[in-house]
Image: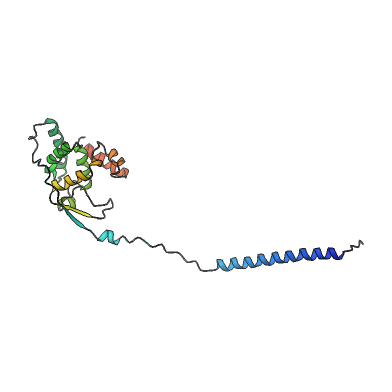
Amino acid sequence: MKTINLTSKDIAINAKVSLVDIVFIVAITILSIACVKQSQKPYTKVQTPKRDITTIETTTETIVKTIEDPNDHEISIGETNNPEIEEVINDIQSFYGSVNAPYSNKIPWLVLECKDRGLNPYLVSAVQALESEWTRSDYCQNYNNCFGYGITDSGVIQQFIEFENYEEGTSYILDHFEVYYKVDTAEQMAANGYNFYPSWVDKINTILTYLNY
């Protein structure tokens, strides 16, 4: 049997190592207990305040816009002495009439107004048709707001704009949003920021085919 003789120095070193091990074990134990207690705390969900949209949906501001007298284009088809313009009027007015659009009689005025402004009457008529359900919407019929100005895509009224008559309402829209309308296609209008939804472009293009454009 082999005998191991430990000196006092060896015993001191072993004792020191053992003390370090004990301290490490105690620290790990305390940390584990703390983690267990923390995990047992009840979970509290942080409630994020929801945006109050009630005021947007229920509070509407009606503004009556009065502008300078719009151009007088009180003409009917066959009175323009311009075959090209008469053809445009006929294209648009015929389809408006086929869907019983209440304001189909306003198309001659609208076409001449667009021509005076250098706008595409087909595109303007298509946007009007989409925004006002072929001029049948309440805000077109009762407030002469046939381009849905102040109405969001979701149908929420943010700021309702009322005009004295159809001509004033249309003139106001074309004055203030000419940058969007001074193009030839729905894609260009969308690119200018008028409407970013691809479905809107598709709908306008469909209406343009109905108008024989």
What colouring method underlies this structural image? rainbow
Q: Can the viewer see residue 9 in this picture?
A: yes
Q: Residue at x 28, y 59 (%)?
A: 56
The percent coordinates of residue 23 (x first, y second) are: 71, 66
Quarter of the C terminus within the rendering: top left
Q: Residue furthest top?
A: 83
Q: Residue furthest right?
A: 1
Number of dots carrying numbers:
0
The percent coordinates of residue 83 (x first, y second) are: 12, 30
Q: Can the viewer see residue 94 in this picture?
A: no
Left-right relation of 2 to 165: right
Q: Residue furthest left?
A: 79
Toward the viewer: 200 or 5? Answer: 5
The percent coordinates of residue 73 (x first, y second) are: 10, 40
Left-right relation of 59 to 1: left
Q: Choose top left, top right, bottom left or bottom right for residue 49.
A: bottom left
- Asked if residue 155 is positioned above or below residue 15 in the image, the reply reads above
Q: Residue at x 41, y 62 (%)?
A: 48
The percent coordinates of residue 148 (x first, y second) are: 22, 49
Quarter of the N terminus within the rendering: bottom right
- Asked if residue 6 is positioned above or below residue 133 in the image, the reply reads below
